[in-house]
Image (spheres, grey):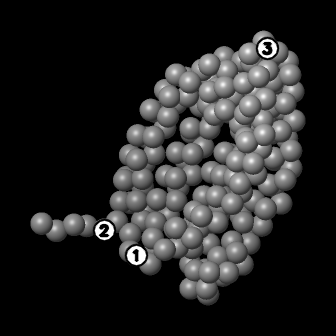
Amino acid sequence: MSERAYVSSEDLAYLTAAQRTATLTSFVLMVVNMVVAPRYARLWKEGNIARIQKLANWSTRGMILFVTPIVTVMIFYPEMIMRLFGSEFEKGARLLSIITVGQFVNVATGSVVYLLNMSGHERDFRRVTFFAGPLTIILALVFTHFWGVLGAASATAIGLSVQNLLALAMVKKRLGFWPIG
């Protein structure tokens, strides 16, 4: 039984380096979530939607402001960043740019996962995940088949973006505001 590899091990190394590097942009989201998630839960329990909205807007704007320069460098100078892993990793520069866009959407939508989960709307986030997860897998298989490692990077960015944008829409529907507003 023969197996067909969609990407070479070399391309996979570039993709892994690009993905891990782009994920650094969402580090600020993880830090902010550790601070705001318990506050969302407390404010929800108090029934204070106005304060939840203010906190979500403030934290999301701050995250966007913080990561925009980093994202700009990763998108416009990806060769410089990838070269840190070795000169041959410059070949993964486009991968870094593509995945960084998805990570920027992740940060720019704010703490949508925690807003849904801490406000009793876990089922809505589960539905979002049940849609975005399989979509990402299908896109990865199809895109990688046609475009190789660029397709894999694109599928990753699209899947992450779809999940966060759908969760953002659910926050608007359930809580009545846009965290990026």
Q: Which residue carries the number 3 mark?
A: 46
Query: From where the camera sits, is residue 177 visible?
Result: no
Residue at 79%, 20% (x, y): give it: 43
Residue at 85%, 18% (x, y): give it: 50
Q: Which residue carries the number 1 mark?
A: 9
The picture places residue 64, in percent across and down from the top left corner, at 81, 47
Extreme top residue here?
A: 47
Query: From where the camera sits, is residue 117 visible?
Result: yes
What type is the residue that disc 2 sits on? Ala
Q: Callout 1: few (<14), some (14-19), or many (20+) C-alpha neighbours within 10 Å?
A: few
Q: Secondary structure at mark 1?
A: helix
Report the side of 174 relative to 152 (left or right): right
Q: Which of pointers 1 and 3 indicates the residue nearer the eye?
A: 3
Q: Which residue carries the number 2 mark?
A: 5
The picture places residue 39, in percent across and down from the top left corner, at 78, 29
Mark found first going from the N terminus, 1 or 3: 1
What type is the residue that disc 3 sits on? Glu
Q: Secondary structure at mark 2?
A: loop
Please say if 4 is above or below 174: below
Q: Callout 3: few (<14), some (14-19), or many (20+) C-alpha neighbours within 10 Å?
A: few
